[in-house]
Amino acid sequence: MKRTLGTLTHPVIGDNPITVQILGICSALAVTTSLATALVMCAALTAVLTVASGLISALRHHIPQSIRLIVQITIIASLVIVVDEVLKAYAFEISKRLSVFVGLIITNCIVLGRAEAFAMRNPVGPSLLDGFGNSIGYSLILIVIGTIREVLGAGTLLGYSVLPTVAQGGWFTPLKLMLLAPSAFFLLGFLVWAVRAWRREQVEQPEFRIRRPAGGGRP
Amino acid sequence: MAGPDMISWWRRFRALPKDSTPKTLAFALAVALGAAIVVSIATVTLRPLQKANLERERQARIVAMVSRAIGDSGPLTAYMIDLNSGRLTRDIDPVTFDAEAAAKNPATSVAIPQAADVAGLGRRAKHAPVFLRFDGDKPVLIVLPVYGKGYQSTIWGYLALKGDGNTIAGLSFFKQGETPGLGARIMEPAWQALWPGKQLADDTGTLRVQVTKGSAKGPYEVDGITGATRTGNGVTNLLRFWLGDLGFGPFLKRLKSGEIRP
């Protein structure tokens, strides 16, 4: 039971796909200009990652080694197309704002990474939990960054005014930088720093050390 | 009999290791088939909803385009016209009319002579919707649906004309698949804002409106987008076709002569 729960909770903070594995950065930057797009993206990734992990795990004894990656990609791509079509039908406005980034879930390393690293070697139940847990880990980061960026960048949250902006007669001048991609890099960097300051075990050992020449100056 | 043969064949197949070539091929085929079925079902069942979304957006875009172009969002009425004669027709509901389907159906469309088919359409529907606003008996705003081949896709849009039928009030595209960052920039409000005020034809009635390569001069030319020459040519061609005799030309003549009233 404890192990089962661990499969679900470990990827949330302990092995978070974004802050620890540093995967899925592209979409984390692109869709977090507002919380609404971030939430829809999270839902899309959760659906794809969970179902893909389950399906690939169910087929794992039959997937031939030589074509396993292309099979995984085919399954993931089909699911992404279905999710994209559903969004276009039921959440048209948001799907337009997400543009290609739902389609790019296909190339999101988290999905293929979990398929290859976990679902291919574990039964369906744990694989579903692992997929779902990683989705929560991904969603958590997107929601945090999306909230900060929307509040500071536009003074709103989910479209509702939180900080009255100067344009509306309030006092808050929106930080336009927050709506640009670099700000997401900064926020992500601070977030990784904060998590690793709290959880020291996540700090990676340097792969090599730069030797400093004695006495300073150039070697 | 084939029965026992099939069974023994199936047994032998089952006994093969999963990495053997026949099993690998069979698995690949099964996955491809499964994926194709799932994707097809999703696409086909959701298409009506997606079309309704696009339709809603289209309606909203007409109003948005018109309000941007002429600074108000007054009412527009949809009419259906027969393109050949240019007369209004009441047989078809303009709101539910599907130009794409009508242009494909031989019963509701006509072939365009190759020499005149500058927009690369092949066929066009016999009818088309138009959106008009009248002030008394005089038309003050004419919105025409236009489409044609761009560089790599069909570009769909609306052209708004002022009451004289020769001055552009606005041009807005709502569907295209041009190169992102180049041709697809025809969707940008900044580019579409270049159109209001441009003239279609000169005093002799010759269509002069065009997207230029380089800088636009005079009342008929609009700056093209750098790196999207063929998309620009596509826009020129689709405007020339739809404003010509095979497009809305006959209708615009009748409108100018005061024959068409609300």
Image (cartoon, coloured by chain):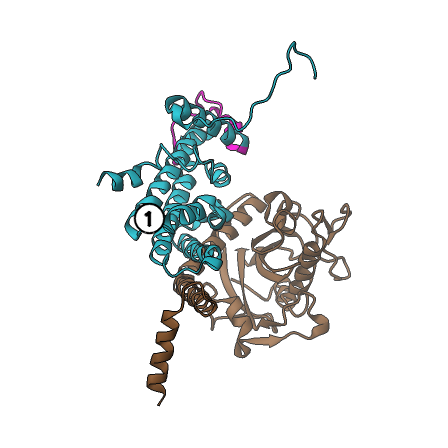
Chain colours: A cyan, B brown
- Residue furthest to the top in view is A215
- State which region is magenta: A158-181
Res B112 quadrant in image: bottom right
Q: Quadrant of the N terminus of chain B?
A: bottom left
Q: Chain of mark 1?
A: A
Whole-percent x, y for residue A5 in the image: 26, 39
Q: Does residue A162 appear to the left or right of B70 in the view shown?
A: left
Whole-percent x, y for residue A58 in the image: 33, 57
- Residue furthest to the bottom in view is B1
Placement of B52 over or under A194, stated as above or below: below
Whole-percent x, y for residue B126 in the image: 57, 73
Q: Which residue is located at x 64 percent, y 57 percent? A: B165
Q: Which residue is mark 1?
A: A127
Which secondary structure lies at badge 1?
Answer: helix
Q: Is residue A168 visible?
A: no
Residues B172 and B27: in front is B27
Whole-percent x, y for residue A200 in the image: 39, 23
Residues B255 and B226: in front is B226
Q: Which residue is located at x 43 percent, y 51 percent? A: A92
Q: Could you tell me how many numbered marks the image carries?
A: 1
Residue A173 magenta: yes
Q: Residues within 10 Å of mark 1 (few under 14, many from 20)?
A: many
**Three-letter amino acid code at disc 1?**
Ser
Residue A166 magenta: yes
Q: Is residue B17 visible?
A: yes
Placement of A113 over or under A35, stated as above or below: below
